[in-house]
Image (cartoon, grey):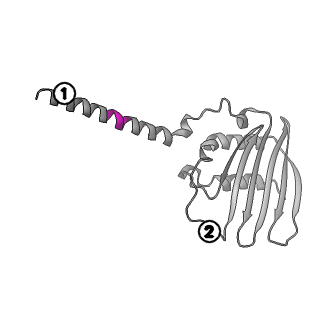
């Protein structure tokens, strides 16, 4: 009879340890953005950098594309393409932009931790009347894409709109 309390105490300790380990695992998953390091991230550290915003679909099947390309440390260009509705004429334009724009986009990339956001779950209900907007950050052989069909944390809810506004500021 005297072994029963010791066995119960050991079993209770094992269960508490298991619950603590599970809680710690979920804590790490929820805080991946704070644990992500940009040391070996090609998008942040390489000389090549591209950021592409796309809006496709919706009731009128519009198609808009803005692609920022950092060609060298002192030269960047923005390729703009827009087709406002099905059957409309496509407008294309190439615009030279200041190199501060890629720097600002890299700040946004780091601030919102895009590699973690790219893993966010998709929404279950999606409206076919609304176009889908997506942003792809890429460099060398690494790229991360986020889109408007994903569920973002509250701090990143307006992220895609912010990037669109930043890029559209250079389109006449």
Q: Position of residue 102 (x, y in %)?
A: 76, 42
**Nearer the viewer's eye, disc 2 or disc 1?**
1
Q: Which mark is residue 60?
A: none
Q: Of helix, strand and loop, which one carries label 2?
A: loop
The residue closer to the viewer here, 75 or 7, is 7
Q: Report the span colored magenta.
A: 16-20
Q: Residue furthest left?
A: 1
Q: Position of residue 40 (x, y in %)?
A: 68, 30
For the residues marked 2 and 1, what is the alpha-carbon distance in whole angstroms?
59 Å
Q: Of helix, strand and loop, which one carries label 1?
A: helix
Q: Which residue is mark 1?
A: 6
Above or below: residue 6 compared with residue 155: above
Q: Position of 41 compared to 68: left or right?
A: left
Query: Is residue 25 located in the magenta-colored stretch of the structure?
Result: no
Which quarter of the rendering shows the C terminus?
bottom right
Q: Quadrant of residue 47?
A: top right
How crowded pointer 1 is (Cα within 10 Å; few <14, some 14-19, many 20+) is rated as: few
Which quarter of the rendering shows the N terminus?
top left
Residue at the location (67% across, 53% down)?
162
Q: Which residue is mark 2?
A: 127
From the image, give the main secondary structure of the stretch colored magenta.
Answer: helix
Q: Position of residue 6 (x, y in %)?
A: 18, 27
Residue at the location (65% across, 33% down)?
38
Q: How many marks?
A: 2
Q: Position of residue 89 (x, y in %)?
A: 88, 69
Residue at the location (25% across, 33% down)?
11
Q: Of callouts 2 and 1, which one flags the residue occurring earlier in the amino acid sequence?
A: 1
How crowded pointer 2 is (Cα within 10 Å; few <14, some 14-19, many 20+) is rated as: few
């Amino acid at each position: 009879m005297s072994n029963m309390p010791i066995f119960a105490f050991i079993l209770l300790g094992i269960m508490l340890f298991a619950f603590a380990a599970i809680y710690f695992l979920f804590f790490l998953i929820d805080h991946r953005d704070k644990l992500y390091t940009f040391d070996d991230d090609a998008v942040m550290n390489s000389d090549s950098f591209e950021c592409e915003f796309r809006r496709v679909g919706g009731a009128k099947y519009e198609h808009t594309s803005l692609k920022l390309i950092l060609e060298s440390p002192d030269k960047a260009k923005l390729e703009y393409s827009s087709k406002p509705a099905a059957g409309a004429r496509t407008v294309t334009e190439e615009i030279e932009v200041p190199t501060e724009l890629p720097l600002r986009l890299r700040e946004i990339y780091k601030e919102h931790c895009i590699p973690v956001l790219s893993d966010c779950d998709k929404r279950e209900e999606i409206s076919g009347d609304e176009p889908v907007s997506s942003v792809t950050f890429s460099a060398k052989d690494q790229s991360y894409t986020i889109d408007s069909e994903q569920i973002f944390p509250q701090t990143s809810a307006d992220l895609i709109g912010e990037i669109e506004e930043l890029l559209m500021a250079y389109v006449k």
